[in-house]
Amino acid sequence: MPLNTTSVPKESMKALKFEEFKKEVLSDYRTAWISRQASLIGRKEVLTGKAKFGIFGDGKEIPQLAMARAFAAGDIRSGYYRDQTFMLAKGLTSIRQFFAQLYAHPSLESEPASGGRLMNGHFSTRFLDDQGHWRALSEELHSTCDISPTAGQMGRALGIAYASKLYRNHPTLSNSTPFSRGGREISFATIGNASTSEGHFWETLNAAAVLQVPLFISIWDDEYGISVPARYQTAKENLSSLLSGFQTEPHRPGIKLYTLRGWDYPALCAAYQEAAQDMRQSHMPVVFHITELTQPQGHSTSGSHERYKSNERLEWERQHDGIVKMRAWMLEAGMATEAEIAVIEEEGLQYTKAEQRAAYQEFRREIDAMASETTGALSDLAQQTTQIAPEVGTHLQSIRQNKEPLRRDLVSALRSSILAARNHPSDARHRVQALLKKFSEQHQTLFSSHLYSQSAQSTQNHRPIPAVYSDKSVTINGYEVLNMAFSDILKREPAFFAIGEDVGKIGDVNQGFAGLQEIYGENRVTDTGIREMSIVGQGLGAAMRGLRPLAEIQYLDYLLYALQILSDDLATLHYRTVGGQKAPLIVRTRGHRLEGIWHSGSPMGMILHSIRGILLLVPRNMVQAVGFYNMLLACDEPAVVIESLNGYRLKERVPENLLEFTLAPGIPEVLRAGTDLTLITYGSCCRMAIEAAERLLELGIDVEVIDVQSLIPFDTEHRLVASIRKTNRFIIVDEDVPGGASSYIYQQVMEVQQAYFYLDSPGRTLTAREHRPAYGSDGDYFSKPSVDDMVEAVYSMMSEADSNLFPPVL
Ligand SMILES: Cc1ncc(C[n+]2csc(CCOP(=O)(O)OP(=O)(O)O)c2C)c(N)n1
């Protein structure tokens, strides 16, 4: 099958006046040259110890110039660490910012991509203003924020592209939004050849081809993944040949595939522009397989490529270096003379050096100011403590001798000095303490802000609207409660849509969306393939463009397939951009107790510990779930909501204001008041805990049952300890493994809420067994905590406390 071949763009050469074209070419060459100098200088900065690690885009410059030419207002890049030339070409980063990131400068003014939180080469633009409000994305150029896990950008890139499709087809949003102009925007993704070995790549590509969304993937192929050559990475060592099966055929839309050589500047420019122009209309995904790329300095500053590349390969790379090739072409095509190019190169080198120096000076400025404050405060203390705490003088000395201390050196000296001078309660020591406090507050903001939303729409600011019940309140099945609510949400919130396996035609496996596709159309309630990672990616990217997706993972057990994107991308997005980007995605799933190893899991510890940055809500029934969905749609944070798998056919009383009422996250609810012991639980265990409490009452034990409801955030008002204060005993029950989510709750209760002050018995946990739940009702009984287990656990705790009243029975 013939693949597109490269050719000099005669048409565009003609179309542009030669002089104008020449100017653009020279400007491109300057960008590539500067980018290369930045890579060379960057490596030196690392090797001389000014920066910790460096990974650069040398060898990948030329196709990025071409990609930049096709990239227009509203388009969004999702790429990886090699794309500095593209970012520079579009003005989305500057050389100074590039170096600020290399030095990990924790300042948004100097390093707007991540405020020093990400290693170098991890690019990003600010989608949000300082208040957390959206900027007019359709009028600007943007890049989502890069992550290091290879191919981790693919799911998000799919979602960015999917939003274009939704905006185009949306009856009301298509032209009246700051996010889109008729869905013409392209999602540009870049990926290294070796990273296409990841399933994420193929899953995304297949999904894009099925969905027919404007995803433009460029593969930078330099034939290696660190040291591992293509023969270990790619079948037949030929990505184009593998990808060719995805190509569009008559009446069978797939993708468009181009194979181009990475040093062929004119051919690349022509092809990128042609493909992008076409894609804005057709929405057909495109893959550019860019071959014959090089990596002049090797993979990163961590190693040298001479260790694994042959001399022949190294020589080939020198000859096929894109910059060398572009330079030769410019001379041959009469774009510039040797002398003109030499001027560009010298000026570019000096410019890069000057910007690098300025970035370093900016990076040092704040720390140097801190250092002089630190030495000032410590020298006062040192003078007064020469006899009793000579260590203070030593700490002072070591800071003075360190020409380029880091923040941690200063803070560490302050902390050690305060301890050393602990017996010297002078003003000088208090001044040191005050300074440390000031620095700590600054560092809290610099290094730990924005894990969760800090905008006015943050869930922390949410004021719940309580559920209202009356004599008229009806009782219906759990799934019908959800169905009523989702129907209303689809009506009132045009940006809301739901996707997932079996969500469309049958309205999800438990009928929460039953009948709603028929009413609201396929774009609002949509079936997807079985591909959990990219379902989340589809939602994540769309949420980054102002839509309000609900992405469904059919069963909690299958969240594992999506855990990487949830943990690495969604959970870190707001934090790693210091509030510059957000994705208020709702991930809906159902779990806990049902039947069998892969439909009864409750791996809550695994989830809890990997998704800090995302809310984790565990409603005990569907009314509570609706309260959370209503709240989430009024706020701007991502959440995982786990409905109880065995609750859809249970009857629930529906509040009068089901469609308006909201729950605030982080607020446990007392389900049953009691005086003897606090039983803390959530999800499916709540009903069982109530049953256990009723049986315990017959044994003379009055248990308070509390539903935690929300694991992240967790009991922000410390209601649990308030209960324990009264009962002086607690047991935590959940369906996770021993030491799983129950230990998280235990740490919250004992350490954060300091419940140990009020305990008459040691707190304990009652969990599932270590193994996955065996099948059937017996399997459940002997694997998960049962009502009998709960009754016995409580009884034995009471018996230990008063064996006369509660004689031991076991
Ligand atoms: C999931 C994952 N596995 C391994 C790594 C370590 N790693 C970083 S880059 C890289 C090679 C990537 O090669 P390629 O995709 O060809 O891109 P290149 O760096 O050559 O441009 C590896 C293995 C990683 N970052 N993420």
Image (tube, rainbow, N blue to C red):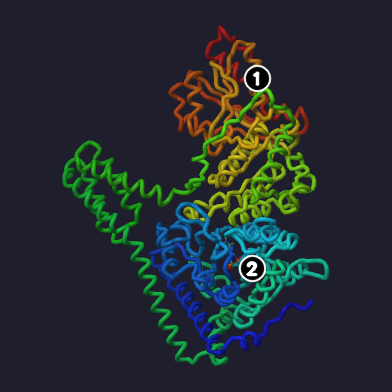
* Front label number (2 vs 1): 1
- Residue at image point 74% right, 43% down: 513
Q: Quadrant of ligand 1?
A: bottom right
Mark 2 sits near ligand 1, with its Cβ under 8 Å away: yes
Q: Is residue 207 left or right of residue 309?
A: right
> Residue 677: x, y in percent?
55, 19
- Relative to 1, does residue 421 appear above or below in the rendering? above
> Residue 218: x, y in percent?
63, 69
Q: Is residue 408 left or right of residue 207?
A: left
**Residue 355 vs residue 220, the one in the foreground:** 355
Q: Is residue 474 left or right of residue 390?
A: right
Q: Quadrant of residue 340?
A: bottom left
- Relative to 184, does residue 200 appear above or below in the rendering? above
Which residue lies under the disc numbered 1? 692
Which residue lies under the disc numbered 2? 193
Q: Mark 2 and mark 1: span between their CA atoms?
A: 58 Å
Helix, strand or loop under label 2: loop
Q: For the residue marked with disc 2, what is the amino acid?
A: Asn
The circle drawn on residue 187 is none
What is the residue that sits farthest to the right in this orientation?
251
Say which label, 2 or 1, has the lower sequence index: 2
Q: For the residue marked with disc 1, what is the amino acid?
A: Ala
Helix, strand or loop under label 1: helix
Q: Quadrant of residue 283?
A: bottom right
